[in-house]
Image: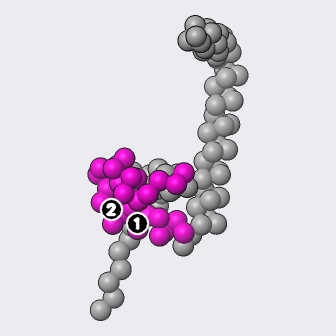
Amino acid sequence: MEMTKEYVQLNEGAYRIAGTRVSLDSVVYGFLDGSSPECIQKSFPTLTLEQVYGAIAFYLANKTEIDQYLADDEAEFEKLRQASRAANPDLYEKLERARKNDLLTSQP
């Protein structure tokens, strides 16, 4: 009798923890930042500790592929961010001025 469990599924181009809406990215980034599986599970209470360990094991078993997937997502996000900045320069200028003003007023 073979007993295996699938902890991660690829749905519509996104890796998710099987049976949930939690992205594999969320678990992997927590793991890479040094969070314990228990800490990661507390951040995502819909996951069991078994699912977190299963997701980490999946990542370690498929590290090259998942690292590339994460890098591709980051590149796509940056591309969208740049397009948004180009399409809305006045908005981003206002946001930058507000951020700088907040930094100046929050200093002792």
Q: Is residue 106 visible?
A: yes
Quarter containing the C terminus: top right
Residue type marked 2 = Leu
Q: Quadrant of residue 86?
A: top right
- In the rendered structure, the answer to whether residue 58 lies left or right of residue 94 reads left
The magenta region covers 33-60
Is residue 80 in the magenta section? no
User: Would you call the spot at circle 1 few (<14 residues within 10 Å), some (14-19), or many (20 or more)?
Assistant: some
Most extreme residue toward the bottom is: 1
Mark 1 in CB contact with mark 2 (< 8 angstroms): yes
Q: Is residue 76 above or below residue 34?
A: above
The residue lying at 67 percent from left, 28 percent from top is 83
Q: Which residue is mark 2?
A: 49
Place of residue 40 in the rendered image (x, y in percent of width and height, measured from the top left): 40, 53
- In the rendered structure, the answer to whether residue 85 lies left or right of residue 29 reads right
Query: SS at mark 2?
Result: helix
Quarter containing the N terminus: bottom left
Q: Which residue is mark 1?
A: 53
Gap in angstroms between the C-alphas marked 1 and 2: 6 Å
Place of residue 97 in the rendered image (x, y in percent of width and height, measured from the top left): 64, 10
Query: SS at mark 1?
Result: helix
